[in-house]
């Protein structure tokens, strides 16, 4: 009996073993899970302790591709990747459309004009200044500086009086004054809208002892006018005023002695489309810088002819000549040269 019972017990134990093993396995899993939960809780406590009131520290985030990283690192990397993709797309677009670097800069400037017009204007001005060049095609015609080559901007922003017109103007002045090939000694010249300074320097070359130049463009003053004065070696006999002519005239009209008073010769050679002739001629008409013996030369375009008055202060218009597309009016003493007056005489074209 004992042996039979023993065999039965053993058999029962063997029969129930899978259930027993399954139960023991579940217990072990439950224990393992409880242990893991405890470790996680402890880790959470440690993480919470890592944060402070200043917001320092970082929450870790798991990514299957990159692993554990602090919160925020993924956003930064994503932004960097996005920028790199944009640059790559831009490069491919440029290659596909055959956009040259020059065209790309133009497109960037256009975009900047939309976003920040003020900065775009400043950048364009700076780029223009850097790109400006000069040439030496002009020269002093006659006198003590005859043949000296003058610098002139190689662009359309400065329109110096052409040599041919300048020669005709000085010949006209000398004819009116009866001084032969030179201007009277101890005379003063005021060159308004001077640009290269060619007219005023020509006056000094032919006899004037002092000249004032008024030019608004600082680049022209530094890189053209100032250097031309140095070329002629008349630094001590000349004064340069970097100012808008209208503002300078208004101030000089109020304080004429600040520039030495009356001038013997005044040349006015403005950029036609950038000046108001009525305003300019009105300032000259009231100017104490013009005396009863002053000679004034005014260059203008045909469309401005109706705005050129017959009288200018104490002076009358004694010449009105046309040289190609250029018109020149000369004002002189009242009644002194009435027999010399020519209205719109057409000399040789340009």
Image (spheres, rainbow, N blue to C red):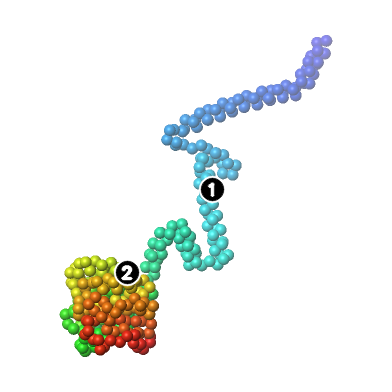
Quadrant in which the N terminus is drawn: top right
Q: Residue 344's quadrant in the figure?
A: bottom left
Seen from the viewer's position, the closer of residues 128 and 13 is 128
Residue 55 in the image: above or below residue 122: above
Left or right placement of residue 150 versus residue 97 in this view = left
Residue wearing tag 1: 78
Q: Residues within 10 Å of mark 2 (few under 14, many from 20)?
A: some
Q: Secondary structure at mark 2?
A: loop
Q: Could you tell which of marks 1 and 2 lies nearer the N-terminus? A: 1
Seen from the viewer's position, the closer of residues 216 and 68 is 216
Residue 207 appears in the rendering: yes
Residue wearing tag 2: 217
Q: Position of residue 274 (x, y in %)?
A: 36, 71
| Residue pictured at 49% horizontal, 31% vertical | 48
Q: Position of residue 229 (x, y in %)?
A: 25, 75
Residue 209 in the image: above or below residue 52: below
Q: Residue 259's quadrant in the figure?
A: bottom left
Left or right placement of residue 36 versus residue 304 in this view = right
Give me the C-alpha separation between circle 1 and circle 2. Answer: 50 Å
Q: Which mark is residue 166?
A: none
Q: Secondary structure at mark 1?
A: helix
């Amino acid at each position: 009996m004992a042996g039979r019972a023993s065999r039965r017990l053993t058999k029962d134990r063997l029969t129930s073993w899978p259930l027993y093993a399954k139960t023991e396995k579940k217990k072990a899993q439950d224990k393992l899970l409880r242990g893991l939960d405890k470790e996680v809780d402890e880790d959470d406590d440690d993480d919470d302790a890592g944060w402070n009131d200043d917001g320092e520290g970082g929450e870790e985030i798991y990514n299957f591709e990159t692993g554990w990283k602090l919160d925020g690192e993924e956003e930064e990397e994503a932004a960097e990747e996005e920028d790199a993709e944009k640059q790559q797309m831009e490069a491919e677009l440029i290659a596909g459309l055959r956009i040259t670097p020059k065209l790309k800069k133009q497109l960037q400037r256009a975009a900047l004009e939309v976003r920040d017009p003020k900065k775009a204007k400043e950048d364009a001005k700076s780029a223009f200044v850097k790109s400006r060049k000069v040439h030496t095609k002009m020269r002093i015609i006659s006198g003590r500086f005859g043949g000296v080559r003058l610098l002139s901007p190689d662009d359309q922003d400065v329109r110096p009086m052409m040599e041919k017109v300048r020669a005709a103007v000085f010949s006209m002045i000398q004819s009116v004054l009866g001084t032969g090939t030179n201007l009277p000694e101890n005379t003063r010249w005021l060159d308004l809208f001077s640009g290269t300074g060619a007219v005023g320097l020509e006056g000094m070359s032919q006899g004037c002892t002092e000249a004032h130049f008024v030019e608004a463009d600082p680049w022209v003053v530094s890189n053209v006018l100032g250097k031309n004065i140095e070329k002629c070696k008349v630094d001590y006999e000349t004064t340069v005023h970097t100012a808008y002519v209208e503002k300078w005239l208004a101030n000089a009209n109020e304080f004429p002695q600040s520039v030495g008073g009356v001038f013997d010769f005044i040349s006015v050679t403005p950029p036609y489309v950038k000046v108001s002739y009525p305003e300019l001629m009105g300032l000259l008409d009231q100017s104490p810088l013009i005396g009863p013996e002053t000679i004034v030369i005014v260059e203008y375009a045909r469309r401005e002819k109706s705005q050129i008055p017959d009288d200018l202060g104490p002076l009358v218009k004694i010449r009105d000549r046309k040289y190609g597309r250029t018109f020149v009016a000369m004002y002189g003493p009242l009644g002194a040269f009435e027999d010399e007056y020519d209205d719109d005489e057409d000399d040789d074209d340009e």
